[in-house]
């Protein structure tokens, strides 16, 4: 991925965040969004993933529904992986690539935010954020 493509992707992430309803944008003030090209091999091994392009996003930390009163949990974080999202959207050379990539960013970001709210994979699939 070129620096220009990274910059475009990151701008699409910002546009996606700005297009979210105010309540969700406010949630992201407490849950940082980190963007990487791809996950590290150690993370893939830990998750049991064999293909780095299979993982488009990841929520880490404790969902709001499981937090205790002590507040000593690991802080939540959302990670988005550029290469997998771009590949899933069909690549940079496809017609309307920016729109397609932007839509995949939105779906992935909302999927990971769903985990922050305590939704599991089945819940997210029913809502269309698979």
Image (cartoon, rainbow, N blue to C red):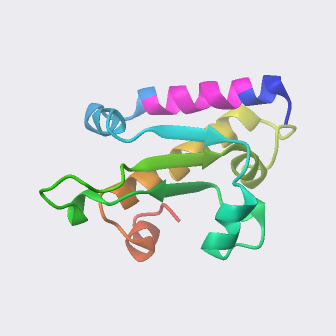
Q: Position of residue 28 (x, y in %)?
A: 36, 37
Examine the structure image and report whether residue 13 is included in the region drawn in magenta.
yes
Quarter holding the N terminus is top right
Residue at image position (45%, 72%) is 121
Q: Position of residue 45 (x, y in %)?
A: 69, 71
Q: Position of residue 67 (x, y in %)?
A: 22, 60
Taking the view exactly as shown, the residue that stands out farthest to the left is: 69
Examine the residues drawn in magenta and state their main secondary structure.
helix
* Quadrant of res 11: top right
Q: Is residue 45 above or below residue 40?
A: below
Q: Which residues are magenta?
A: 7-17
* Quadrant of res 60: bottom left
Q: Is residue 22 found left or right of 47 in the rendered image?
A: left
Residue at image position (28%, 33%) is 26
Q: Is residue 56 found left or right of 97 in the rendered image?
A: left
Residue at image position (79%, 50%) is 90
Q: Is residue 2 found left or right of 125 in the rendered image?
A: right
Q: Position of residue 62 (x, y in %)?
A: 33, 60
Residue at image position (25%, 54%) is 72
Q: Is residue 95 above or below residue 3?
A: below
Q: Is residue 22 above or below residue 36?
A: above
Q: Nearer the viewer, residue 5 or 37?
A: 37
Q: Nearer the viewer, residue 1 or 122?
A: 1
Q: How many marks?
A: 0
Q: Nearer the viewer, residue 43 or 10?
A: 43
Examine the structure image and report whether residue 119 is included in the region drawn in magenta.
no
């Amino acid at each position: 991925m070129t620096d220009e493509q990274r910059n475009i992707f990151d701008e699409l992430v910002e546009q996606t965040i700005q297009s979210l309803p105010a309540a969700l944008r406010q949630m992201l003030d407490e849950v940082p969004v980190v963007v990487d090209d791809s996950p590290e091999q150690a993370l893939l091994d830990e998750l049991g993933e064999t293909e780095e392009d299979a993982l488009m996003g990841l929520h880490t930390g404790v969902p709001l529904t499981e937090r205790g009163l002590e507040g000593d949990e690991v802080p939540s974080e959302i990670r988005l992986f550029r290469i997998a999202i771009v590949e899933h959207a069909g690549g940079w050379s496809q017609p309307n690539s920016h729109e397609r990539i932007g839509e995949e960013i939105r779906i992935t970001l909302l999927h990971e935010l769903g985990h922050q709210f305590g939704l599991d994979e089945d819940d997210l699939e029913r809502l269309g954020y698979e």
